[in-house]
Amino acid sequence: MCVSFDTWVIKMGIGKYLPTIITGANKSLGDYLVKCTFRKNPKDFSRERKLGFKETVSFMLNMINKTLQLEIDNFVEKVLNMDMTITKQAYLAARQKIKPEIFMKLNDDINKIIYQEADDDGYKTWNGYRLSAIDGSVMEIPDTKELREEYGYIKNQNGQVARAKAACIYDVVNKIVIKSKIDRYTASEREMAKSLITELLPDKKENELILFDRGYPSSELMVYLFDNKIDFVMRAQRNYAKAVDNAKNEDQIIVQYNKKCYKVKVLKFMLDSGQEEILLTSLLDEKLTIKDFKNLYFKRWGIETKFDELKNRLEIENFTGTTKQAIEQDFYATIYISNMIELVRTHNDEKIRKKHSEKGLKYEYKTNLNTLTGALKDKFVIMLMENSPRKRNKMLKVIEKQIAKSIIPIRPGRQNRRMKRQVLSKYKANRKRCL
C-alpha cells in the first residue's frame, strides 16, 4: 500500500512542512494573480510562449552556475522535457519582465507556514524565544559602471571595484533566513538591521530574541528594540561607552536614557582565548548565568556559517546578469533556495537520527550538505513544477536514496585555530563544487 506524501513526513521537525511549502509554491507560480502582481507590465506574459512566467521563475531557482546557454539547454531537456531550443536572448528578455519581489514572496510563504501556521511541535525555540541573529556581509558583484553607480565600490591598486552589502535575520535554531536585504556597499549595518526588523514586525513572535555582533550596539538601536518589545544580546567593543567601561562587576545593570528609562544588563567575562567579552542585553532574568549567556551568544556563529554556505556552496555571488534587477533576482532566489535546502536537510537528518538511534554509534550523523545541494539540481524545480503530490513523494525518495550513503559525523566541541593568511587559491581541495 502506498503511503501518501503528507503522511510520510509527519513529525519531522520543520521538515514536515516541506510538502505544504512545495504545494504552496507550485500554486503561487501558476496563479494568475501572482503573475499579475510580480510582472513589470500588464502586457508581459499575456501570450503563451516557450518561457512563461512559471518557467522563467523556475529556471532562476535552478542554481545557475555554468554558462547561461548550457544551463538553458539543460533546463529545457531535463526539467521541461521538451525538444526545442530557447536562446539566451529569449531568457534575458523574459527575466526583465519579472520583479525580484517574487522570490521574497516565496520566502515569506515559507516563514508563514513555519512560524504562523505551525502546530505546537513545529519550530524550535530557545527558552520560549524565537532566537535569531542579524549580520551583514560584503558581496562581490559584476564590476560594471552601472553597478558601481548603483551599489557603490571599493578602491584598490587597480581602481574602483563594484561591491554591495547584504544582511539578513537568521533563525539560528531552525536555520531559516527570515528576512534578507541587499543594498549599497556604504549602507549602515545598523540601518539595514532596523529595516529588516521593521519588515519583521507584522509577523513578530511574542517572544523575539535577536543576537548582534559588536558593530551594532547603539542607544538608538536598543531603544528601537525596546519600543518594539524585542529582546536582544549585543556584543560590545571596549570603549563603547563610559557606563559600560566603568561597570566593575561581572554582572551589573546600567540604565540608558532616551526620554525614557531603559535597563540594560552588562556582562563581562573572559574567553578561553584570554580576551575579555562584553555583552549588553535586555534579558534581566536572574536565573540566567554568565555561562548561559556565553552559550547563548555562541549560537550567533550560525549566521556566519550561513553566509559561508551562501557564498561558497550556493555561490550567491555568481550573478547571472549585470543589472540591478538581475542582481536582486539572483540574490533573493538563492536565499529562497537556501531555505528549501534546509527544509530537505532537516527532513533527512531526522530520518538519519531515527535510523541510528539504536546502533550505539560514537557520533551522531547528519546530511552532507554538498551532496544534498548537488542532488537537488534540476530535481528541485521539477518537484516545484509538478502538480501531483504522489510524484513529488517519489522524487524526494530518489533524492534521499542518492544522499543516503553520503552522511558525515557530528563531532561536538571540535575547534580549529583561526589563522589570518593570504589566500592563494579560491578553489580548495576540501571545498569541491557541488553544482
Image: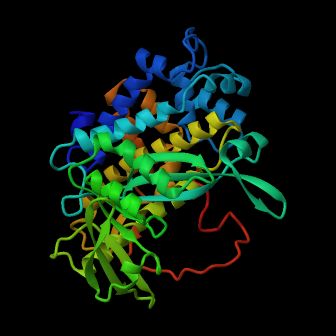
* Image coordinates for residue 139, horizontal then vertical, percent: 62, 54
The residue located at (68%, 42%) in the rendering is 150
The answer to whether one can see residue 344 in this image is no
Residue lying furthest right: 158
Q: Is residue 195 left or right of residue 187?
A: left
* Image coordinates for residue 137, horizontal then vertical, percent: 56, 58
The answer to whether one can see residue 222 in this image is yes
* Image coordinates for residue 107, horizontal then vertical, percent: 41, 39
Most foreground residue, 401 or 14:
14
Tell me: residue 101, above or below residue 290. Answer: above
* Image coordinates for residue 51, horizontal then vertical, percent: 60, 20
Most foreground residue, 90 or 147:
147
The residue located at (38%, 49%) in the rendering is 197
Query: In the figure, residue 300 lies in which quadrant?
Result: bottom left
Residue lying furthest bottom: 274
Tell me: residue 209, above or below residue 344. Answer: below
Q: How is the image coloured?
A: rainbow
